[in-house]
Amino acid sequence: MLLIASTVKLIAEIALLGLFGQWVLGLLVGAQKDKNLFYQILQIIGKPFVAAARLITPRQIIDRHVPLVAFLLLLFVWMGATVLKIRTCLDIGVALCK
């Protein structure tokens, strides 16, 4: 269970940092963001999670807001995985979680 919680937490952290970095870089670069190589790399990292968020959101939510929905969903997944990891570590002993 510890391995599953750690893996889910790690994947959520990578995706969260990718989406956050994409947002910050988009603010810094502005309208030319689609031509920026680093923005495109961060977009590739977050694309599967944004696509999954698009599948579960209603059509009334515009495409511009879907990355925010994906970020919030990933944040909840990360929090859940963190709580699960803490509970597992407390159950098996903190010394075994290192």
Image (spheres, rainbow, N blue to C red):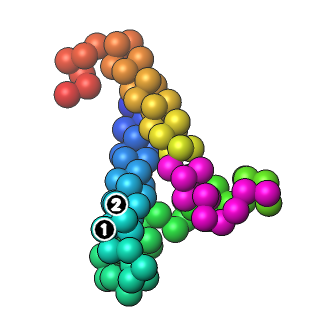
> Which residue is depicted at the point 37% across and 65% down?
27
* Residue 5, label in figure: none
Residue occupying image coordinates x 52% and y 36%: 76
Residue 24, numbered label: 2
The answer to whether residue 69 is magenta is: yes
Work out whether 40 lies above or below 45: below
Q: Single out the residue that lies furthest toward the right.
A: 59
Numbered range of the magenta stretch? 60-71
- Residue at horizontal 44 percent and vertical 71 percent from the top: 43
- Does 95 appear above or below 73? above
The verdict on residue 79 being magenta is no
Horizontal side of 62 relative to 44 (left or right) equals right
* Residue most extreme to the bottom: 35
- Assign the magenta stretch its main secondary structure: helix
Question: What residue is disc 1 on?
Answer: 28
Density class for disc 1 (Cα within 10 Å; few <14, some 14-19, many ≥20) is: few
Q: Are marks 1 and 2 in contact (CB under 8 Å)?
A: yes
Q: Nearer the viewer, residue 32 or 34?
A: 32
Badge 1 amino acid: Leu
Mark 2 residue type: Val
Mark closer to the observer (1, 2): 1
- Quadrant of the drawing holding the C terminus: top left
Q: Quadrant of the N terminus?
A: top left
Residue 37 drawn at (x, y percent)? 32, 82
Q: Is residue 93 shown to the viewer in this render?
A: yes
Is 88 left, or right, of 98 in this rendering? right
Q: Circle 2 sits in a helix, a strand or a loop, which is it?
A: helix
